[in-house]
Amino acid sequence: MQELINGLDSIIPEMLEDGGPPRVPPASKEVVEKLPVIVFSEELLKELGPEAECCICKENLVIGDKMQELPCKHTFHPPCLKPWLDEHNSCPICRHELPTDDQKYENWKEREKEAEEERKGAENAVRGGEYMYV
Amino acid sequence: MIDFSRVQKELQDCSRDNDSSGIRVSPKADNLTRLTGTIPGPIGTPYEGGTFQIDITMPEGYPFEPPKMQFSTRVWHPNISSQSGAICLDILKDQWSPALTLKTALVSVQALLSAPEPKDPQDAVVAEQYIKNYQVFVSTARYWTETFAKNSSLEEKVKKLVEMGFGDAQVRSAIESSGGDENLALEKLCSG
């Protein structure tokens, strides 16, 4: 009986994991380290206006502030961004995902992307078919 | 550690533009860990005309963790527990982001009132009624709004009791001594 329970203990988490999307892992440490740092300059102040702020601490940006830039071009104070990317892999503003160090998650994402493209392909095929009858 | 300077700034921003949205956030105690949010029921919904209060508890990790929000005003909605006021909303759980604020979260809660998701229910009874008997759902939700979310103002209460034949000063002191409870005030007026 105990053996059976132990067996279930190892199977159930696997079964659960297999279902929905896995828990999102943190962003890759290496990628985060290599994020470009830009300095908030007078030109940027002119471009973005005096109301420009770091969306995490909500402080207005001042000339000379160092800002970390994500691939989606959203910028944050490095100390504000760090605690978030230590636990998550997405841009706080647009949810653009950074690569992670978790191979399992990356594989799952790749499969999802392919499935999504297949769905789109199927939709287009139907649409193409409709056009043929018009 | 809660970023109190950010919370403070959010409260200021909220009080600056509460006229247009009607959404308010105010601290419960002076330590800013417990707050009260207020949202008007969206127009064109069974919640229209109601004012809904939401208990907000700030977690240690704010703004990296979502604020805990729960209706303290009772509400009849598929995604809100009719018993506890617990809210089923993704941005208050795994879809939270530190770019969101108390204000934007409350805007989302208000949007949830306009657009229930009965397939992802918090309250199974309400969700079933929503799906199977929409008209009954609407009238129940409206009744709950009338009963729990419409707190008439002091002047309205005074007017009502004065119309029953009690004196103005007497009415005011009765309302005050019953903590604003109009029914309790009426009982006092009748017995004394």
Image (cartoon, coloured by chain):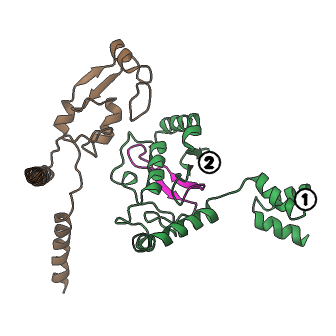
In the rendered view of the protein, which quadrant contains the C terminus of chain B? Answer: bottom right
What amino acid is labelled 1 in the image?
Answer: Gln
Query: Foreground: A127 or A52?
Result: A127
Sequence-wise, which precedes: disc 2 or disc 1?
Answer: 2
Q: Which residue is drawn at 59% across and 67% down?
A: B143
Q: Answer with the quarter of the image where residue A72 lies.
A: top left
Would you say residue A61 sits in the magenta stretch?
no
Q: Residue at x 54, y 70 (%)?
A: B140
Residue behind mark 2: B29
Residue B49: give x, y in percent of width and height: 60, 54
Q: Give the range drawn in magenta.
A: B47-73
User: Tag 2's secondary structure?
Assistant: loop
Q: Are there few (<14), some (14-19), or many (20+) residues within 10 Å of tag 1?
A: some
Whether residue B185 is visible to the viewer of this picture, yes or no, is: yes
Chain B shade in the render: green
Q: Answer with the quarter of the image where residue B87 lies.
A: bottom left
User: Tag 1's secondary structure?
Assistant: helix
| Pointers 2 and 1 in contact (C-beta within 8 Å) | no
Separation of marks 2 and 1 at Cα, in angstroms:
32 Å
Give residue A86's mark.
none
Decide: is A123 above or below A78.
below
Residue B127: give x, y in percent of width and height: 41, 70
Chain brown in the figure, letter: A
Give residue B170's mark.
1
Whether residue A64 is visible to the viewer of this picture, yes or no, is: no
Residue B93: give x, y in percent of width and height: 37, 54
Query: Total of numbered circles in the picture?
Result: 2
